[in-house]
Amino acid sequence: MSRKLMVAGNWKMNKNLMEALTLASQVITRAKKTSGKVEIVLAPPSPFLHTINSMSKDLGFVKVAAQNCHYEQNGAFTGEISAEMLKSMNLAYVIVGHSERRKYFNDDHSVLSKKVTAVAGAGLGIIFCCGEPLDVRENNNHQSFVQTQLSDSLFNLSAEEMKNVVVAYEPVWAIGTGKTATPEQAQEMHAFIRKIISEQYSSEIANNCTILYGGSCNPANAAALFANHDVDGALVGGASLHSDQFLQIINAREFLPVR
Ligand code: PGA
């Protein structure tokens, strides 16, 4: 996977069936009017993945992501979904390591590293989330915190597998809070993430890695975030639930230069 401009919408546990199909169809209809140079990723709740993936399949630049998966391929794990199942639906990505999964579902480093291995093994792309809580930022330890998250859960991948990874930097203090990292804070962390990927793998893999910002990204702040050299796009929560706001964020990405 080469470096992309990307805007991904993480719908979390929102929308019923009709609402989800309406939102997906609004986004897809409007996406047809964009140039297609921004990859648009929709991450709806799992019951709607298959239908929304079918709806989007004619537009090569609209992809669908699962919000989570289990690390085993199959078995007696009631309620869980495997990467292999998601692969059989031809999805493009799985989000792994979202801070809400880490906080509410005990997705710690050892679980996440197994999930990363399972998703890579199924041949799906990974959108790997990392980011520090507020106290870590205030103590100025954010870089080493994120470095540990990446090295503990992601850097077990081979160089070949790492080519299918998108990293989403999502400072926990900015998620759903209305507080956004400043463009300078985002750029500093994205450049740092690219540097450690380069040290771990190669400068080619680092330069080709798509790195998204997430955390209260909205139409008002998107352009300033995207203007930074290492910010390739966004992982959007709340604003992705409204097609007009989501499209404005996509447009903000579209009209800035390709890197
Ligand atoms: P938010 O969520 O845009 O609502 O802050 C981002 C995310 O959790 O990915």
Image (spheres, rainbow, N blue to C red):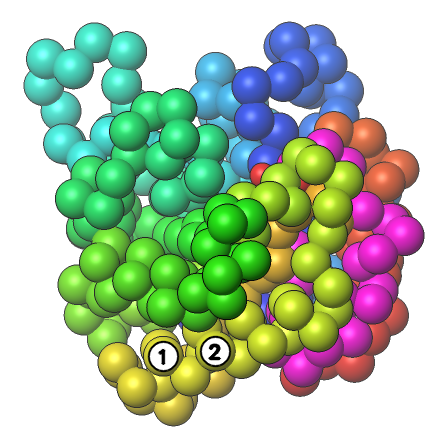
Q: Where, by quadrant of the figure, is residue 88 drawn?
A: top left
Task: Tell me if residue 249 comes above or below residue 30 in the rendering.
Answer: below
Q: Where, by quadrant of the figure, is residue 153 drawn?
A: bottom left
Q: Quadrant of the C terminus?
A: bottom right
Q: Position of residue 102 (x, y in %)?
A: 36, 35
The residue at 23%/75% (across/down) is 159
Q: Which residues are magenta?
A: 218-240
The answer for how far apart the CA atoms under marks 1 and 2 are is 6 Å
- In the drawing, does residue 122 fall left or right of residue 208? left
Q: Dot 1: what SS?
A: helix
Among all residues in the image, which is located at the extreme front?
Answer: 139
Relative depth, front residue between 176 and 223: 176
The residue at 29%/62% (across/down) is 148
Q: Which residue is mark 1?
A: 196
The residue at 76%/40% (across/down) is 178
Q: Residues within 10 Å of mark 1 (few under 14, many from 20)?
A: some
Q: Where, by quadrant of the figure, is residue 151 drawn?
A: bottom left
Q: Position of residue 68 (x, y in %)?
A: 38, 33
Q: Quadrant of the N terminus?
A: bottom left
Q: Amino acid at mark 2?
A: Phe
Q: Is residue 7 magenta?
A: no
